[in-house]
Amino acid sequence: MVTPYRPTMTDVTTRQSQENTAFETRPRPSRAPRRSARAPRPRHANALALIAGIGLGLSVGLAFVGQSIASFGTAGGWFTFAGRLTGLSGTYLLIIMVLLVTRLPWLEETVGQVRLVHWHRTVGGWPIAIIALHVVFITLGYAEASHVGVLSEFWTFLMHYPDMLTATAAFVLLVVAGVSSIPAVRRTMKYQTWWAVHLYLYLALILAFAHEIKTGVMFIGHPLTLDFWIALSAGALGTVLAIRFLRPLARNLRHQLRVTSVREEAPGVYSLVIKGRNMTRFEVAGGQFFQWRFMARGLWWHSHPYSLSAMPRPPFIRVTVKRLGMQSLAATRLKPGTRVFVEGPYGVFTRHARRGGRVVLIGAGVGISPIRALLEDLPERTDVTVILRASTIEDLVHRQEVTQLVSERGGQLHEIVGSRKKVHLDGKALRKLVGNVSNTDIYVCGPAGFSANITETLMRLGARHERIHQEAFAF
Ligand SMILES: Cc1cc2nc3c(=O)[nH]c(=O)nc-3n(C[C@H](O)[C@H](O)[C@H](O)COP(=O)(O)OP(=O)(O)OC[C@H]3O[C@@H](n4cnc5c(N)ncnc54)[C@H](O)[C@@H]3O)c2cc1C
């Protein structure tokens, strides 16, 4: 029997909170962190894009240094030139690909990690293909010039040219990383294996560097171009070191986070409360996530993204984790006292993304967790409607807290509970719950299929694309 769709409008004033933790909703503590995470700075992001464009122009221009018109007429001249062009532009683009996922603060705050990773994935194959062309063109060019076969020339490169063996090793690493990112291959790999393979890209860039400056005609006898290339490579390496290692290290030394308690919130969903030092300086906006590294056996070497499920209550922060695979299962069994290393905060699923006054928050399953934190962080007078979706009432994560927060704001809360087959959150239902969405900011967080469906429905109802904000729980 199909149960007719009947959304529940919760009477937010009658329910009592049954929870008694540091995160039970109450007036924001006076010792709340001094600053929320920074608002997006599109101008800075645009400036970075401009610098990247100029860098690409300069790198392509380097191919002309040491190149005469006459050299095009010599045997293999065109191939050699094409080899230089592809080598320089491919290496430059590879550096940009690495920087895109380095979590540069200006880019991350404005574009968000999910979109940066998407860009990286969409164009990440290009530098590898361009560098493959470099190998082919240079070998063809030199083979023609020396009047020998391609394989013979390749062997000469390996045996007699400086640092060509390490450059070949770098190329193999590049190809392995590229192949591992093909969706069909990626699906067969564990996330950690794929991630470890990707780490070799850094090694590839380092291994290839010596052959670039020792064999590139644009660098030999041209100190200015050599200085540019060294500055570019060292700058990229320094940026990665500073942002991925030194900055998080300094932050973690400052806060020294440790697990305080682990509690089941809903079937298979656990809250981890974490305590730290100097937590009034722990800046984060509601809805943001961190990369979490739990310093326990078998867990310390990989980090996973989890969103905060409440604004910090110094000295505590909280994250809510759904048991899914090995890491999340182990995380929910952590012992109090376990050290935690975090990187972040990341993400643009925050109040800063709003364009207007009215806000609708839609969360499903463990996706309710960042919605709960975002709700707490919205400016006081925001007109807010919250829709929570789950299969059973017990699956409504942080239900009491959301109820109380909505009540304090005088907002509306709708709980849509029931199996997907029987209870539909379709266009008709959404229209009934939220009315006109054309001038509304809508935040959606839940399983990928759920978020995609809701977004499509909202667009049909007249919502504006730039005002639908999604947090996907997968990169
Ligand atoms: C921005 C963001 C915020 C998130 N916030 C939360 C949250 O608040 N609560 C919550 O329960 N879950 C959250 N997740 C999902 C959570 O990170 C994954 O469920 C978790 O990493 C799964 O790891 P596992 O070893 O338990 O499962 P696995 O079986 O190893 O993986 C399950 C799925 O998670 C993906 N995954 C595994 N490791 C990672 C990783 N390090 N980075 C990205 N994806 C990974 C895998 O590709 C796979 O699709 C979030 C994910 C993202 C991207």
Image: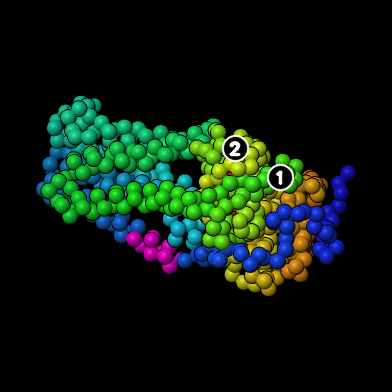
Q: Secondary structure at mark 2?
A: helix
State the residue position of label 2.
327
Q: In the image, what residue type sits under mark 2?
A: Gln
Q: Is residue 324 above or below residue 99?
A: above
State the residue position of label 1.
263
Q: Is residue 283 above or below residue 1?
A: below
Q: Coloring scheme of the render?
A: rainbow
Q: Look at the image and tell me in which quarter the N terminus lies.
A: top right
Give the class, few, some or many, for how many residues have Cα within 10 Å of label 1's Cα (few <14, many ≥20).
few
Say which residue appears at 33% left-offset and 35% top-offset: 171
Disc 2, ligand 1: is the CB inside 8 Å? yes
Q: Which residues are magenta?
A: 42-51
Say which residue appears at 48% left-offset and 50% top-offset: 253
In this picture, residue 469 sits left or right of residue 109: right
The reply to whether the magenta stretch includes residue 47 is yes
Q: CA distance from mark 2 to mark 1?
A: 17 Å
The reply to whether the magenta stretch includes residue 9 is no
x then y, percent, for residue 321: 65, 45
Q: Earlier in the sequence, mark 2 or mark 1?
A: 1
Q: Residue 385, located in which quarter of the rendered image? A: bottom right
Q: Nearer the viewer, mark 2 or mark 1?
A: 1
**Of 111 and 265, which appears nearest the observer?**
265
